[in-house]
Image: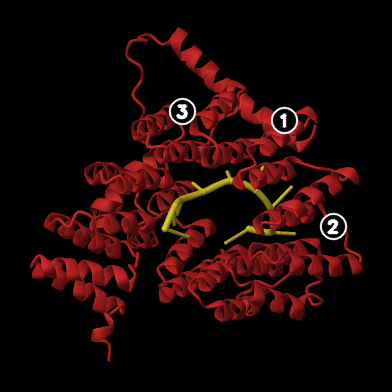
Chain colours: A red, B yellow
Amino acid sequence: MSLLLFKQLSSKRRRNSHFLLLQHSFYHSKSPINPPQPQPLQESVIANLILRNSTETTLTQTLENSSISWSPDLVNRVLKRLWNDGPKALTFFQSLENHQTYKHSSSSYDHAIDIAGRLKDYRTLWALVARMRTQRIGPTPKTFAIITERYVSAGKPDKAVKIFLSMHEYGCPQDLHSFNTVLDILCKSNRIEMAYHFFKVFRFKFRADVISYNIIANGWCLIKKTAKALEVLKEMVERGLKPSLSTYNVLLKGYFRAGQIKQAWDFFKEIKRRGCEIDVVTYTTVIHGFGIVGEIGKARKVFDEMIKRGCLPTVETYNAFIQVLCKKDNVENAIVIFDEMVSKGYVPNQMTYNVVIRGLCHAGEMDRAMEYMGRMKEDECEPNVQTFNVVIRYYCDTGELEKALEVFHKMDGGAYLPNVDTYNVLIGAMFVRKKPDDMVIAGRLLMEMVGKGFMPRRFTFNRVLNGLTVIGNHELAREILRVQSNSGRLPRAFKI
DNA sequence: GTAGGGTTAG
């Protein structure tokens, strides 16, 4: 059985077992009138506990006194919950470092290192690496992938490459695998020029393979330079490496991204004509590519064609199709497809819902958008930060700030922590009504985001400071100025 | 976390 078919069947099976479970509890429950209340997840309860304790000392005591039996999996789930409050996440991690019985696993160290890196707290990051080493649980190649990514996205790609070249000094030798990882990280962080240079210097040393070439070709495609991608692939073939299906999919996507729709279509026809194996990724790429330029008819045709040819769509295919229908057709037509996928036994995921909810918001159907958000929970498909951000953004756009703030407050409680986008959207919205109270809210939100390790841009700082000065709230303004000077993002006038 | 398909909007 092909992997594709297997994926389809397993997702159907999941849904069927869900139905069976419901039927089972309906027939066997002693009191079907009182359905069992859903228990809050353990990691959610713990995350709330952590968010309420302000210092490491009180937290350590609280955790020592509690009878939680820690496991690497539980610690990872808690860290995931606390993802958008980096300082609290690290405090939690460190408070367990001296636990009497529990010892952190390698993967938990990786998470903590990732969080420290995002906070640009490199001292903590390297202290954690050293600690991994003394515990003899790392650092692993994955740890180095995380560190490399954090340095690249902090604008230090040279440093990132140096770290990669020194990883063997940490007992972690470089190989083709880790070479490809670094190339991919550089490409995905918009450093294709550097990735290509690095690739050319080391391709013989690491015996670059099809995957290395695909990564580089994809890098060029990401910045719409399909000609460069083709050049790289030509060289690959000259070296005797055979293109894979991924190679074709990379190039196909590259044509669409670069707006070379005709080339994309010709290329798609060509690979079919040559009898190359086409898979669901190829079809999804074409459906999305045509849809996004408004060619809904063609997208639909390809969607029908794949089914006719026995290539079953996946949830991702549906997500792509639903998204383009929302954007270039009509949200009602998108919902028809949404219902169709559900009736066929597919389980919509968070992205499916987010795409539909965004489509409804865009059509001004905020109430229906909120209905779908409620439906997510019923479907055991918890809304994520993106779900909240979409709804908050659109409430802000329509000037319903009270509703935006109401949704924002629903995020409180540890289950879904706001991220940097949430704060930026809300703070920006506080300037439209010119109400003094809104300035105070903006000021508080700014303080809150800084406390969670999200650094606002200088523009945001200045805007909020101005607003507070205009309404005469000098106290909050001073507090913010203090935070800003600690962060090093001083207003230009204050420099020197 | 060795590659390819599905989220924001200006």
Mark 2 surroundings within 10 Å by alpha-carbon count, few (fewer than 14), some (14 through 19), many (20 or more): some
Task: Please name the residue that numbered disc 1 is placed on.
Answer: A304
Earlier residue among tags 3 and 1: 1
Q: Amino acid at mark 3?
A: Asp
Circle 2 chain: A
Task: Please name the residue that numbered disc 2 is placed on.
Answer: A243
Q: Is residue A218 left or right of residue A341?
A: right
Where residue A171 appears, x then y in whole percent?
Answer: 64, 73
Q: Amino acid at mark 1?
A: Asp
Circle 3 chain: A
- Nearest the camera: A403 or A293? A293
Q: Is residue A112 left or right of residue A7?
A: left
Where residue A343 appears, x then y in whole percent?
Answer: 58, 21
Marks 2 and 1 close (CB-CB < 8 Å) = no
Where residue A59 appears, x then y in whole percent?
Answer: 27, 56
A216 w.r.t. A71: above or below: below
Residue at the image position 62 percent from the left and 22 percent from the top: A344
| Residue A138 at least partly seen | no
Q: For residue A229, which numbered disc appears in the image?
A: none
Residue at the image position 20 percent from the left and 75 percent from the top: A481
Q: Secondary structure at mark 1?
A: helix
